Image (tube, grey):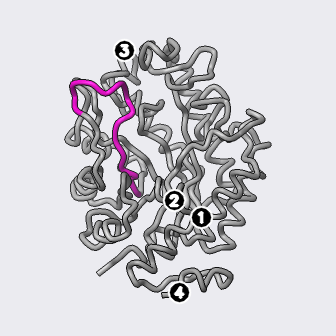
């Protein structure tokens, strides 16, 4: 039976365990140039030393106006490649594999003078009014994703994650709440996302996994639920997704459609349903910081990988401590062996 410390292989990606550091924006590019800093280097490499099997670098944007804030990472310029490569190379040195999340914030780009979106619908009264992308601009946006993927590959990453969740641009296209277009991208709500995925796939080595983060449930009135997300995930799977990273929400202010859970493992049922319906590997995320619970999700075959967000923000050595608590063998840096000896 598999557990949290069982190695996992997906295509050419070989991970020493099932523990994932998920993408979490750090809003720490003080120069506002999208280039990763020494902070980002320490942030990610410390988690590699701390035993994470797979690290996904935070939301990294395809254009300057696609950032949530001007303090976010970017890959719209070749000048941004070396700093990412430095992080990837160092993480590899300590036994972790590295992915990167490629994204565009769409109407949630807080520092863009005029954000762009599928339709001119603001997130809420506190956000700027976006303008709708023209059909030609949507096609150009696909190419911006393509070029960002090209740069990520030059930086040496082991996998690409396309961000289709949390109310950002791809999510905005496939949600009926935010896509009111009457062109080809409104007639088929998954067309933009599928074109981005296919463009990414065309640039990636054949043995590199393509990942996609999706919100499997919306928490607003008339928002979609798991049944609808299974259907659009099938289309994304056909476009080339090898593994889904299952989250939820982010599309609007929480309303009559329900509230997201705050209990441990509240999103695991969503991951389990996607995994079962599509027969596809999934990453479970959401308050899985307790090692016994994370281990059970793997052992019960509800998910293939476990993303530990808050737990790793609070403790870079979460994976090493989990191995001690669960009495599982794992490689411990010799410098820290006395600290994690069972």
The residue shown at (42%, 36%) is 166
The residue shown at (75%, 44%) is 80
Inspect the magenta stretch and tell me whether residue 256 lies in it: yes
Q: Name the residue under label 2.
A: 312
Mark with earlier residue (3, 1): 1
Relative vertical location of residue 126 with respect to residue 206 in this rendering, above or below: above
- Mark 3 or mark 1, which is nearer to you? 1
Mark with earlier residue (2, 3): 3
Q: Name the residue under label 4.
A: 341
Q: Name the residue under label 3.
A: 182
Mark with earlier residue (2, 4): 2
Cα distance between the residues tagged 4 and 3 = 62 Å
Q: Which mark is residue 47?
A: 1
Mark with earlier residue (1, 2): 1
Q: Residue 33 carries which label?
A: none
| Crowding near the residue tagged with mark 3, few <14, some 14–19, many ≥20 C-alpha atoms within 10 Å | few
Magenta: predominant secondary structure element? loop
Mark with earlier residue (4, 1): 1
Which span of residues is magenta-colored? 243-258
Image coordinates for residue 99, horizontal then vertical, percent: 56, 57
Secondary structure under the numbered disc 2 in the rendered image: helix
Cα distance between the residues tagged 2 and 4 = 20 Å
Cα distance between the residues tagged 1 and 2 = 7 Å
- Mark 4 or mark 1, which is nearer to you? 4
The residue shown at (36%, 46%) is 247
């Amino acid at each position: 039976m598999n557990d949290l410390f069982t190695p996992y292989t997906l295509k050419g990606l070989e991970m020493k365990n099932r523990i994932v550091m998920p993408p979490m924006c750090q809003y720490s590019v003080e120069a506002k140039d999208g280039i990763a800093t020494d902070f980002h280097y320490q942030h990610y490499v410390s988690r590699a030393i701390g035993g994470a099997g797979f690290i996904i670098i935070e939301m990294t944007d395809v254009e300057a106006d696609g950032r949530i804030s001007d303090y976010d990472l970017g890959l719209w310029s070749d000048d941004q490649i070396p700093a990412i490569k430095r992080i990837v190379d160092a993480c590899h040195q300590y036994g972790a594999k590295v992915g990167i999340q490629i994204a565009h914030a769409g109407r949630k780009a807080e520092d863009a003078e005029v954000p762009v979106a599928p339709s001119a619908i603001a997130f809420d009264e506190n956000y700027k009014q976006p303008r709708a992308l023209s059909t030609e601009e949507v096609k150009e946006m696909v190419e911006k994703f393509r070029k960002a993927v090209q740069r990520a590959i030059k930086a040496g990453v082991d996998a690409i994650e396309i961000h289709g969740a949390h109310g950002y641009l791809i999510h905005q296209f496939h949600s009926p709440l935010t896509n009111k277009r009457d062109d080809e991208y409104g007639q088929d709500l998954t067309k933009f996302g599928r074109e981005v995925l296919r463009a990414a796939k065309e640039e990636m080595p054949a043995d590199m996994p393509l990942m996609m983060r999706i919100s499997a449930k919306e928490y607003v009135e008339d928002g979609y639920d798991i049944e609808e997300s299974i259907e659009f995930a099938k289309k994304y799977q056909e476009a080339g997704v090898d593994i889904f990273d299952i989250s939820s929400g982010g599309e609007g202010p929480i309303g009559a459609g329900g509230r997201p859970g705050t209990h441990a493992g509240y999103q695991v049922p969503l991951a389990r349903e996607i995994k079962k319906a599509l027969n596809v590997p999934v990453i479970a995320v959401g308050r899985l910081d307790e090692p016994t619970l994370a281990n059970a999700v793997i052992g019960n075959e509800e998910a293939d990988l476990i993303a530990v967000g808050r737990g790793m923000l609070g403790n870079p050595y979460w994976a090493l401590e989990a191995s001690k608590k669960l009495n599982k063998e794992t490689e411990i840096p010799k410098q820290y062996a006395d600290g994690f000896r069972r």
